[in-house]
Image (tube, helix red, strand yellow):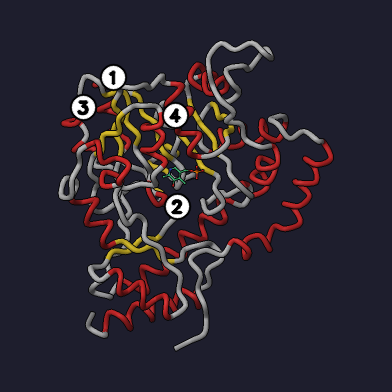
Amino acid sequence: MTDVRVPLLDLKAQYETIRGEVRSSIDRVMGSQRFILGPEVEGLEQEIAEYSKCRHAVGVSSGTDALLVALMALDIKPGDEVITTPYTFFATAGAIARLGATPVFVDIDPGTYNIDPAKIESRITGRTRAVIPVHLFGQMAGMAEIVDIARRRKLYVIEDVAQAIGSEIGNSRAGSIGHFGVFSFYPTKNLGGIGDGGMVTSNDPELAERVRLLRQHGSHMKNYHHGVVGGNFRLDAIQAAVLRVKLKYLDRWTEARRRNAARYRELLNSIAGVQLPVESPGSRHIYNQFVIRTGNRDALRSHLQECGIGTEVYYPLPLHLQPCFNDLGYKEGDLPVSEAAAHESLALPIYPELTPEMQQVVAEAILEFEQKGS
Ligand SMILES: *Cc1c(COP(=O)(O)O)cnc(C)c1O
């Protein structure tokens, strides 16, 4: 029908707009020859803390390591249980399992795909130590309910903010509500580096200090003296320098994503077989992904691919059914809302540089498919 190709994401388009600034930030680090921590990392930490309306931020090597080091800082160990969602990127539960603790999966809300707070309490046992809500696709989980449960049942809360930097509920930003917020700067996140990177935020100075210790082998103030066993979870100075450039544009990019989402809503609103993403009241969705739902997902995906339109399935197999978690004893049917979402969800291109013309192409291709009487 048309020869406009629409990729799921186009990082080159974004790079073109900031190439000069990014290159001089890299040059600045090269000139200083300070590659490990130092002023760029400290600068980014302050800026992310401010951006996330949080008191402390500690740069780490990835979102995965942010999860791991936050759990380590809470002394999560074998025998402990940590409640989370099965409908997330693997790292959320992988970090729990790597420490020998047990992920306990609680089903999601069918509208937002986030953990369903109403289902958490029945899964709390004497061994439960923490809850990790994930702010999936860019929208915050029901933090008011989650924090209320956690206070009453004396649990820690770690917000997985990997997909949701800058998202809000009321006046609270993602990462400023729980004991920790964990961020990822993986290149495809809304604030993406030129490699791996992550951040841990906290309002508690002692918890933040523990993360600071653990990210450098338990040795922070005094070299070669180790109070605890940590690891090398440091954020690279070059990543920090580039991320500081990109952070200045983040709000502009987020607004473009939100505009694109609004435009999709207009274009796709009347297509009967397609369910649009649900925005919960009072929340600011930052659209790391724009995920629609349809009964004939795989056929629609093939059709869009033939039309030159990139899509992705987040996530095709919920974590409770992953082979590596077989011994946790879950079976198909245990968490039906997540399982249905895994069959029906499809992420469309939503990146800031997407043009109205490209969105028109996407919408027409979807309409064409639905009218064929799928
Ligand atoms: C990307 C992601 C992570 C992991 O971040 P990395 O930087 O890739 O290690 C963790 N949780 C969620 C929800 C993610 O989307």
Task: State which quadrant residue 310 falls in.
Answer: bottom left
- Residue mark closest to the camera, 4 vs 3: 3
Pointer 2 residue: 286
Q: Name the residue under label 1.
A: 154
Mark 4 closeness class: few <14, some 14–19, many ≥20 residues within 10 Å: many
User: Residue 291: x and y, percent?
Assistant: 36, 60
Quadrant housing the C terminus: bottom left
From the top left corner, tell me how far across and down residue 292 is, in percent.
Answer: 32, 64
Disc 1 residue type (three-letter) = Lys
Identify residue for label 4: 180
Judging depth in this view, the residue of 84 and 171 nearest the camera is 84
Q: Check the picture and name the quadrant holding the N terminus.
A: bottom left
Residues under labels 1 and 2: Cα distance? 30 Å
Horizontal side of 138 relative to 248 (left or right) equals: left
Label 4 residue SS: strand
Which one is in front, 89 or 26? 89
User: How far is mark 4 from mark 3, CA to CA?
Assistant: 20 Å
Q: Mark 3 — residue?
A: 124
Viewer-side label of 3, 2: 3
